Image (cartoon, rainbow, N blue to C red):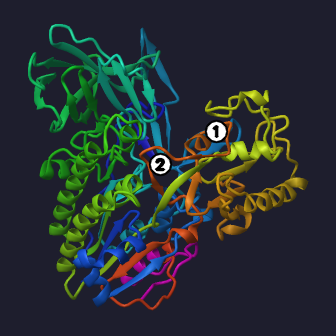
Amino acid sequence: MRTAGGIALPLAVLILLPGCAHQHATKAAGRKMIVLGLDGLDPGFLEAHWDVLPNMNRLRQTGDFKRLGTTIPPQSPVAWSTVTTGMDPGGHGVFDFVHRDPATRMPVSSMAEITPPKHTLELGPYLVPLSSGSVTSSRAGRTFWQILEDQGIPSSVIRMPANFPPAECEADSLSGMGTPDLMGTSGTFTFFTDDPEEKRTAVPAGKIVHVAVANGRAVLRIEGPPNTFRSDGAAASVEMIAYVDPTEQAARFDLGDQQAVLGKGEWSNWLHAGFKMLPLVKSASGILRIYLQQAHPYLRVYVSPVNIDPAAPELPISTPASFSRQLSDALGPFYTQGIAEETSAYRAGLLNKDEFLVQSHKILSDSLRMFRYELAHFSDGLLFYYFSSTDQNAHMLYGKYDDDLLDVYRAVDGAVGEAMAKAGNDTTLLLLSDHGFARFDRAVHLNAWLMREGFLYLDDPANVGDDELFAHVDWTRTQAYAMGLNGLYLNREGRENGGIVPASEVQQVKQTIIGKLLEFRDPKDGRLVVGKVYDSDTAFRGHNLKMAPDLIVGYHRGYRGSWQTALGAVPGTLIDDNTQGWIADHCMASDEVPGVLMSNRKMKLESPQLYDVTATILAEFGVPKTSAMLGQSVF
């Protein structure tokens, strides 16, 4: 747990944190290891393109290449938590991107919990904290780099997913997936326009703000973190002024004392935004980028989520606390948001594919620049470096725009070649992905299926639709409900508030649901929808099942739980065609989307699993795994 001496906001918090003690231990005895995490790197895609990926092809020829068994379910925060701890989800306790609170059946983050200060002093409209808030990781278990540090072996762990706040240790670390923006969300963009044809005001993970352009001038109000120094919690904000050229497709943007002049289709460099929280006392620093989609006939401007400023972080994003500032000094500002690729604006049709690719390649460029910096400074112990681009681009490209995806793979292949050169003959190199990929053609409304089968009831059968958070569910008759991308929960007596399924009937209800799901056929063409259904009571070797779904649905390739299912909606159809830009996924049966494991050494283990990676890292330095860990060295 990290203690906050400033204020804590509900998922948008300004926390003043001490850094952990930092010493550069040197007890690796000359042993060195580089581990590259390439999220979503797909074995089938690799095998189809070895001829244009020379470094990974050489790595598998001179070393080894295997498919890597993934977790149940094969979701990134679940899988990387297994790599981090060497435990299955039943050990580390992460089962989805979102969990649900059984008392309210409302979604909660699976990765971190932010608690505000318990004691405050009210002064007019402001609340002054008199005690500390906290940021706590939801993941159980110790990380492999903490265990290495116990033995005096230095580590650098860059952008490990599900590591926010970063595990307390002496290693250099930078948090990755799960790190919020300054608003405390996973990433909320803003799109400003005066286009009268744009009727929307909100889209998933974004806001559309309608502005007035008068005499070539528009005020763009950029929202920052909720200000819990204020008793009303009103969000802090800054104003950016846009001056639109009267004839050219160009505009100047003024933010404080900074200016950015952009032509149509151009991106700004990073701009700094200071959000005033407590007059004369506290401001919150963030960074953002802007994109001028067009200036005429209507203004259309994308503003990125406000990222935590690595030079002045308001939330804990690194160990030691000064490490993000060190990186910023060396490299300049960089994306700190855990998932920064702008898939949401693309899904909403606000960015087209080419615009998305430009933005996602900026993130890849950021990442490659940081990777080269870390590689140049690596001399002893362990270097772990994570790339998100292979995953986030695959979601939007795999199976349809393979040439564009191949460009990403080529760029990462170049990084692999640099790592191979650095490793030489005296450093073990390991490359892994947490899962593979498949097309996402059909979206399954699991709550609608539960309703059809008589496990879920509404207050009125006519109230089907996209209303989220179980708005019309009748809990007095409902036996089961779905939330998240793979999770299915029983409405259990004594666990859920008002639950109705008694303990004596739990197994019967589960078995009935499992049987029916395995017989569930697509009304469109008769294909089986579900390949496997996992019972959490038997699927895991660990027993940390407090937040576990009762059942985990493993879909066949081509199918995935719908976006509506993830947040508790009950649409009127069972399955719909996926018509959004998010065209590929991996939240399916785990054996249908294996990951990749490659090394510059031959591997003895024939069917490696993700938790074997953890044991392998420790074994390379002669450190025994803990009793809670499941794996074995692959060598």
Residue 1 got which mark? 2
Look at the image and give the residue range highlighted in magenta: 613-635
Quarter residue 155 falls in? bottom left
Q: Return the residue nearer the eye: 170 or 520.
A: 520
Quarter residue 277 falls in? top left
Label 1 element class: loop
The residue that label 1 is drawn on is 568
Count of numbered tags: 2
Residue at the extreme right: 504
Residue 372 got which mark? none
Label 2 element class: loop
Residue 169: percent from the left, percent from the top? 37, 60
Residue 422: percent from the left, percent from the top? 18, 77
Residue 426: percent from the left, percent from the top? 23, 87
Counting residues from the start of the chain, the first of labels 2 and 1 encountered is: 2
Report the residue at 45% width, 55% height from top.
162
How far apart are the alpha carbons under marks 2 and 1?
A: 30 Å
- Horizontally, is 425 left or right of 83 in the view? left
Q: Are there few (<14), some (14-19), or many (20+) residues within 10 Å of tag 1?
A: many
On screen, residue 533 above or below 484: below
Q: Main secondary structure of the magenta part?
A: loop
Q: Return the residue nearer the eye: 141 or 158.
A: 158
Residue 168 on the magenta segment: no
Report the residue at 45% width, 65% height from top.
143
Q: Return the residue nearer the eye: 391 or 249.
A: 249
Report the residue at 52% width, 84% height from top.
607
Residue 179: percent from the left, percent from the top? 39, 46
Q: Can see residue 85? A: yes
Which kind of residue does numbered mark 1 sit on?
Gly
